[in-house]
Amino acid sequence: MEILMVDDHVLFRDGLALMMTQCFPHVVLREAASLSSAIKQLRRPPAVEMVLLDLGLSDSSGLDSIDRLRKIAPDVTLIVLSGDDRPETVVASIERGAAGFIPKTARSGVIETGLRTVIEGGVYIPRAAVQLVRGVAPGEGKGWAEVGLSQRQIEVLYGLSAGDATKTIARHMNVAESTIKTHLVGIYRKLGVTSRTEAVLAAARYGLLDNLLSTQRHP
């Protein structure tokens, strides 16, 4: 897997590169110190499958970095690694297409967990962000039945919220991975979303994850 790390802090890049080498030996890690450099790398082979993006780059500002990168590589998996870990920043990053958000201030073990979760196909959102959106948007207080999710779809959504990959959810539910993908299509349609991360945030807005928050594995 080709992963591009975009961060203008050399010490952070060096530390993360060392951790990636130790924990993810199958990953080919490339580095860029600016968004313009990252864009150049995204335009040449081999294809980058995942980008680790800092929001405090010298040639780009905050969430604009996500928008600019998505225009160049709309299909690449994006993880935001940022020192700005305010819940509203986390939510805004997810809404712009990030598959996960990992605070740069987090312990190395937390960063590894977040990266592994997304690399394996899961969703990583800090618990504080899920708590922030609880009851903020229209639809607050809706129950499972009112949203129209089946019991199996609820199980799948809980798996997503815990950061599980599709194959892990399938194993826990003792069904084929293709069955989970079919459930995801139904979940997206009923919640009016198009991605796993959006589904988790939508469920939080409806208050559907309250029982999960006490046992959620994320920090």
Image (spheres, helix red, strand yellow):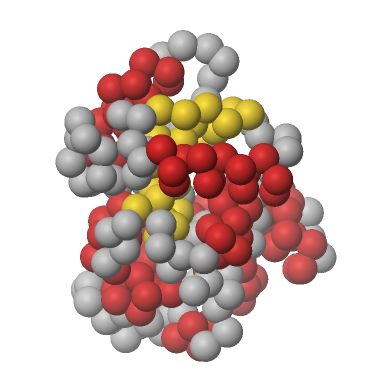
Q: Point out residue 155 in the picture as x, y percentages from the top left corner.
A: 62, 73
Q: Point out residue 107 in the picture as x, y percentages from the top left corner.
A: 52, 65
Asked whether 92 or 85 is in front, the reply is 85
Asked whether 43 or 204 is in front, the reply is 43
Q: Point out residue 181 in the picture as x, y percentages from the top left corner.
A: 63, 50
Residue occupying the point 40% across, 28% down: 32
Residue 159 visible here: yes
- Label total for image: 0
Q: Is residue 198 left or right of residue 164?
A: left
Up-down: is 121 above or below 40?
below
Residue 203 visible here: no
Up-down: is 15 above or below 150?
above
Q: Is residue 1 left or right of residue 78?
A: right
Q: Point out residue 82 in the picture as x, y percentages from the top left corner.
A: 34, 53
The N terminus - image quarter = top right
Residue extending furthest toward the top: 44
Q: Is residue 196 left or right of residue 91?
A: right
Residue occupying the point 21% across, 35% down: 58
Asked whether 171 or 44 is in front, the reply is 44
Quarter of the image for residue 65 reads: top left
Residue occupying the point 21% across, 46% down: 62
Up-down: is 45 above or below 134?
above
Up-down: is 74 above or below 166?
above
Quarter of the image for residue 66 reads: top left
Residue occupying the point 37% across, 25% down: 38
